[in-house]
Image (spheres, grey):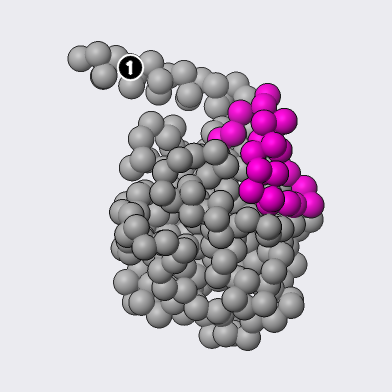
Amino acid sequence: MGSWISDTRKRIYRNTKYWLMRPAPPSAPSPFIGPVVVVGSAPVSHKPAGFNENFAVITVNGSQSVSAGWGVEIPAVTMMMFNQVEGTTPNAIEVRRVLKGRRTGALYVLLWRKDDLQRLEEGLRAFDYSYDTLQIVDRYERMALLDRVAGLRSLELDADSKCSNGMNAVLFALHNGAPAVIITGINPNSAGHVYNQAGLTRLHTQMDKQLVAKLLQAGRPIYTADPLVSEELGIPLWNGLGS
């Protein structure tokens, strides 16, 4: 009973705050004019066909270790979850390990407190991770991204009602003008991460699948460089020509 009351209060609070704030989704430093590759950290990923300097790369958490193998030392954008900065879980520790001494272009940290920027900057310096620009994305801006791009409303009450950071990066690319978004290393059916051997279960599976189906139904220009993901989720396989 108590849990039901708590959930109801949370639902009313978040819905009211979202309506009153009317938040805007996060914006890129400049609109994307070429294909955007969103690189996740699933154990299997592939460099897209025809990949060159005209592609922009968005990495998620520790997946910069993948794009570095393609010769992309500094991705255009990195999206990082707040708990990767100071967290003590095996995954957070591994993320900091693979990012130590690296750099990104625009860094978006999700769900960090906006009134504690100094602590965030100090946390990033602690593992020598640098950036050109830094922006904190709060819950309501993330909700707006899902709402505006996919027409889906989520109050983010639990893990099942949220999409993954990788899919948030896909929404971000679409919102900021990407003419094509190629996904690699993002597979809701997989477990584990490319940068560690912990084999952690992947969260947000059903919401990610629902979002992919919604984007495909709307004719959004999303593709995958991973044949298995194309087969399992019905996302068109990128062939270098955008079709």
Q: Nearer the viewer, residue 108 or 215?
A: 108
Q: Position of residue 110 (x, y in %)?
A: 57, 41
Q: Is residue 124 magenta?
A: yes
The correct choice, above or below, for 100 with respect to 137 in the image is: below
Q: Residue at x 43, y 51 (%)?
A: 91
The verdict on residue 207 being magenta is no
At horizontal 33% and vertical 64% (from top left) the residue drawn is: 190
Position of 230 relative to 214 (above/below): below
Work out whether 10 lies above or below 72: above
Camera-side residue of 201 and 156: 201
Q: Position of residue 213 (x, y in %)?
A: 39, 60
| Magenta-drawn segment | 111-134
Please tell me which residue is depicted at 74% across the width and 77% down the height of the picture: 53
Residue 117, by quadrant, is: top right
Q: Residue at x 41, y 49 (%)?
A: 90
Circle 1 crowding by C-alpha within 10 Å: few under 14, some 14–19, many from 20 = few
Q: Quadrant of residue 182?
A: bottom right
**Residue matched to label 1:** 6
- The type of residue carrying mark 1 is Ser
The N terminus - image quarter? top left
Residue sitting at the far left: 1
